[in-house]
Image (spheres, rainbow, N blue to C red):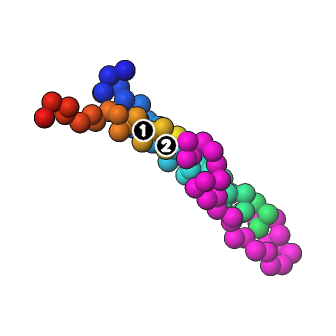
Amino acid sequence: MGNRLNKIIGTVFLLASGAYYTAERIGAKIAAAIPAAGSAARGSYDATPTNPTFFENFFVWFFMLVGFVLLTFGFPKDRDG
């Protein structure tokens, strides 16, 4: 696999990790808003979303790790000097 391909795939994995984490946080906010909207007419309701942490989802940190490793291998050091 060439250095350029490692850079591209590593960048894609890092972007996928960030997009997946962002989508997960958006889903948590929507999931917290649905019961809050339903019980707003009846009284008070704690609508604080429980945001997922970085290590709760396997794919987020796995994609980030793979992306970082591939990106690192895409920039090799000069072995001649």
Asked whether, in this view, residue 12 is left or right of residue 49, the answer is left
Residue 59 drawn at (x, y percent): 60, 42
Mark number, residue 69: 1
Q: Quadrant of residue 4?
A: top left
Q: Which residue is mark 2?
A: 65
Neighbor class of circle 1 (other Cα within 10 Å; few <14, some 14-19, many 20+) is some
User: Which span of residues is magenta-colored?
Assistant: 37-62
- In which quadrant of the rendered image does the N terminus lie? top left
Say which of 79 and 74 sits in front: 79
Q: Say what amino acid the circle numbered 2 marks.
A: Leu
Q: Is residue 40 magenta?
A: yes
Asked whether, in this view, residue 42 is left or right of residue 32, the answer is right
Q: Name the residue at 56% across, 50% down.
A: 21
Mark number, residue 6: none
Give the prevailing secondary structure in the magenta stretch. loop
Residue 80 drawn at (x, y percent): 15, 30
Contact between marks 2 and 1 (CB within 8 A): the answer is: yes
Q: Name the residue at 32% across, 22% down.
A: 2
Quick check: can you spot residue 29?
A: yes
Callout 2 secondary element: helix
Say which of 11 and 61 sits in front: 61
- In which quadrant of the rendered image does the C terminus lie? top left
Q: Name the residue at 76% across, 74% down.
A: 46
Residue 45 drawn at (x, y percent): 79, 75
Q: Say what amino acid the circle numbered 1 marks.
A: Val
